[in-house]
Image (spheres, rainbow, N blue to C red):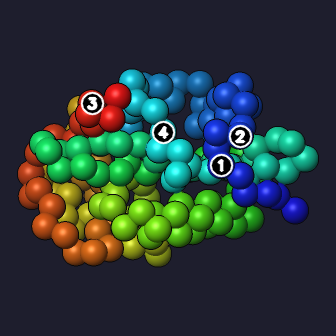
Amino acid sequence: MPELVPLERVASKQLEQLLDDAFGTDRFGRTAYLLRKRSKAIAALSFALVENGVPIGSIQCWPVRIGDFPIVLVGPVAVTPNQQGKGIGHQLMHAMLEAAGKMGEPVMVMIGDPEYYERFGFNSSQTGGWTLPGPWEPRRLLARNAKGLAVPTSGMLEEDDRAL
Protein backbone atom coordinates (compact mmCIF):
# COMPACT_ATOMS: atom_id res chain seq x y z
CA MET A 1 0.00 0.00 0.00
CA PRO A 2 1.51 3.37 -0.97
CA GLU A 3 2.33 5.79 1.84
CA LEU A 4 1.62 9.53 1.61
CA VAL A 5 4.69 11.48 2.76
CA PRO A 6 5.80 15.10 2.67
CA LEU A 7 7.67 15.64 -0.59
CA GLU A 8 10.74 16.84 1.29
CA ARG A 9 11.22 13.22 2.46
CA VAL A 10 11.81 12.05 -1.13
CA ALA A 11 15.34 12.19 -2.51
CA SER A 12 15.61 14.82 -5.24
CA LYS A 13 17.12 12.27 -7.65
CA GLN A 14 14.09 9.99 -7.18
CA LEU A 15 11.70 12.91 -7.68
CA GLU A 16 13.47 14.01 -10.85
CA GLN A 17 13.26 10.46 -12.22
CA LEU A 18 9.52 10.33 -11.49
CA LEU A 19 9.01 13.68 -13.26
CA ASP A 20 11.11 12.56 -16.25
CA ASP A 21 9.10 9.33 -16.48
CA ALA A 22 5.78 11.17 -16.24
CA PHE A 23 6.51 14.22 -18.43
CA GLY A 24 9.70 13.56 -20.37
CA THR A 25 13.13 15.10 -20.10
CA ASP A 26 12.05 18.11 -22.18
CA ARG A 27 9.64 19.24 -19.44
CA PHE A 28 11.82 22.20 -18.43
CA GLY A 29 10.74 24.11 -21.53
CA ARG A 30 7.10 24.14 -20.49
CA THR A 31 5.48 27.41 -19.43
CA ALA A 32 4.71 26.17 -15.91
CA TYR A 33 8.44 25.67 -15.35
CA LEU A 34 9.04 29.34 -16.19
CA LEU A 35 6.79 30.24 -13.25
CA ARG A 36 8.84 28.28 -10.73
CA LYS A 37 12.39 28.14 -12.07
CA ARG A 38 13.91 29.90 -9.03
CA SER A 39 11.25 29.07 -6.46
CA LYS A 40 11.13 26.47 -3.75
CA ALA A 41 8.02 24.29 -3.49
CA ILE A 42 5.62 25.06 -0.65
CA ALA A 43 6.46 22.19 1.70
CA ALA A 44 3.07 22.13 3.47
CA LEU A 45 1.29 21.54 0.13
CA SER A 46 3.72 19.18 -1.61
CA PHE A 47 3.46 15.40 -1.22
CA ALA A 48 4.51 12.06 -2.66
CA LEU A 49 3.03 8.61 -2.64
CA VAL A 50 5.82 6.13 -1.99
CA GLU A 51 5.68 2.39 -2.50
CA ASN A 52 8.56 0.16 -1.43
CA GLY A 53 10.77 3.21 -1.02
CA VAL A 54 10.09 4.54 -4.53
CA PRO A 55 7.86 7.54 -5.33
CA ILE A 56 5.03 6.56 -7.66
CA GLY A 57 3.31 9.94 -7.59
CA SER A 58 3.94 13.50 -6.47
CA ILE A 59 2.29 16.88 -6.26
CA GLN A 60 4.09 20.17 -5.84
CA CYS A 61 2.80 23.69 -5.15
CA TRP A 62 4.66 26.95 -5.67
CA PRO A 63 4.29 30.62 -4.73
CA VAL A 64 3.26 32.83 -7.66
CA ARG A 65 1.46 36.16 -7.93
CA ILE A 66 -0.35 38.61 -10.13
CA GLY A 67 0.90 42.01 -9.05
CA ASP A 68 0.75 41.91 -5.25
CA PHE A 69 -1.92 39.19 -5.13
CA PRO A 70 -0.44 35.86 -3.92
CA ILE A 71 -1.56 32.66 -5.63
CA VAL A 72 -0.50 29.03 -5.23
CA LEU A 73 0.60 27.33 -8.45
CA VAL A 74 -0.38 23.65 -8.35
CA GLY A 75 1.72 21.22 -10.33
CA PRO A 76 3.19 19.20 -11.53
CA VAL A 77 0.92 16.38 -10.49
CA ALA A 78 2.99 13.39 -11.59
CA VAL A 79 2.19 9.70 -11.62
CA THR A 80 4.62 7.10 -12.91
CA PRO A 81 3.22 5.74 -16.20
CA ASN A 82 2.70 2.16 -14.99
CA GLN A 83 0.58 3.45 -12.07
CA GLN A 84 -1.69 5.82 -14.00
CA GLY A 85 -5.41 5.21 -13.81
CA LYS A 86 -5.25 3.81 -10.27
CA GLY A 87 -6.44 6.91 -8.38
CA ILE A 88 -3.00 8.19 -7.37
CA GLY A 89 -3.62 11.64 -8.84
CA HIS A 90 -6.90 11.82 -6.91
CA GLN A 91 -5.17 10.89 -3.65
CA LEU A 92 -2.50 13.53 -4.19
CA MET A 93 -5.00 16.25 -5.09
CA HIS A 94 -7.17 15.45 -2.06
CA ALA A 95 -4.16 15.49 0.28
CA MET A 96 -3.04 18.86 -1.09
CA LEU A 97 -6.54 20.34 -0.88
CA GLU A 98 -6.95 19.14 2.69
CA ALA A 99 -3.63 20.81 3.58
CA ALA A 100 -4.71 23.97 1.72
CA GLY A 101 -7.87 24.04 3.82
CA LYS A 102 -5.72 24.14 6.93
CA MET A 103 -3.87 27.12 5.42
CA GLY A 104 -7.06 29.10 4.89
CA GLU A 105 -7.92 28.04 1.31
CA PRO A 106 -5.51 30.17 -0.74
CA VAL A 107 -6.40 30.98 -4.35
CA MET A 108 -4.79 28.36 -6.60
CA VAL A 109 -3.94 28.17 -10.28
CA MET A 110 -2.76 25.37 -12.54
CA ILE A 111 -2.28 24.50 -16.17
CA GLY A 112 -4.21 21.29 -16.74
CA ASP A 113 -7.08 19.43 -18.32
CA PRO A 114 -10.36 21.01 -17.22
CA GLU A 115 -12.17 17.71 -17.70
CA TYR A 116 -10.02 16.20 -14.95
CA TYR A 117 -9.44 19.10 -12.57
CA GLU A 118 -12.99 20.52 -12.47
CA ARG A 119 -13.88 17.76 -9.97
CA PHE A 120 -11.45 19.46 -7.56
CA GLY A 121 -12.99 22.92 -7.98
CA PHE A 122 -10.67 24.25 -10.71
CA ASN A 123 -12.07 26.08 -13.76
CA SER A 124 -11.20 28.88 -16.16
CA SER A 125 -13.99 31.29 -15.17
CA GLN A 126 -11.61 33.76 -13.47
CA THR A 127 -8.49 33.34 -15.60
CA GLY A 128 -9.60 34.87 -18.92
CA GLY A 129 -7.57 38.04 -18.41
CA TRP A 130 -4.50 36.35 -16.96
CA THR A 131 -1.36 35.82 -19.01
CA LEU A 132 1.68 33.59 -18.64
CA PRO A 133 5.38 34.03 -19.50
CA GLY A 134 5.17 31.46 -22.30
CA PRO A 135 2.64 29.67 -24.51
CA TRP A 136 -0.52 28.19 -23.02
CA GLU A 137 -4.04 27.23 -23.97
CA PRO A 138 -6.52 29.59 -22.24
CA ARG A 139 -8.99 26.76 -21.58
CA ARG A 140 -6.27 24.93 -19.59
CA LEU A 141 -5.42 27.86 -17.28
CA LEU A 142 -7.54 26.91 -14.28
CA ALA A 143 -8.10 28.56 -10.91
CA ARG A 144 -9.64 27.42 -7.65
CA ASN A 145 -11.02 30.16 -5.44
CA ALA A 146 -12.80 28.28 -2.65
CA LYS A 147 -13.47 31.43 -0.60
CA GLY A 148 -14.74 33.49 -3.55
CA LEU A 149 -12.10 36.17 -3.03
CA ALA A 150 -11.82 39.17 -5.33
CA VAL A 151 -8.93 38.20 -7.59
CA PRO A 152 -7.21 40.29 -10.26
CA THR A 153 -9.18 40.20 -13.49
CA SER A 154 -6.05 40.67 -15.59
CA GLY A 155 -2.30 40.49 -15.24
CA MET A 156 0.76 38.34 -15.71
CA LEU A 157 1.29 35.33 -13.49
CA GLU A 158 4.89 35.39 -12.29
CA GLU A 159 7.13 33.87 -9.68
CA ASP A 160 6.50 35.35 -6.27
CA ASP A 161 9.98 36.75 -5.71
CA ARG A 162 8.93 37.80 -2.22
CA ALA A 163 9.08 34.09 -1.35
CA LEU A 164 12.56 33.59 -2.82
- Report whether residue 82 is seen: no
Residue 43 percent location from the top left of the image: 53, 45
Residue type (three-letter) at the residue carrying disc 4: Ala
Q: Which residue is mark 3?
A: 161
Residue 50: horizontal and vertical position, in percent? 79, 49
- N-terminal-most mark, 4 or 2: 2
Instruction: Say which element carries label 2.
Output: helix
Specify the label residue 9 is tagged with. 2
Q: Quadrant of the N terminus?
A: bottom right
> In this figure, which residue is indicated by the disc labeled 1?
6
Q: Which mark is residue 41?
A: 4
> Of marks 1 and 4, which one's residue comes earlier in the chain?
1
Left or right placement of residue 38 versus residue 143 in this view: right
Residue 18 figure quarter? top right
Residue 64, horizontal then vertical, whole percent? 30, 42
- Asked whether the viewer can see residue 32, the reply is yes
Q: Amino acid at mark 1?
A: Pro
Q: Earlier in the sequence, mark 3 or mark 2?
A: 2
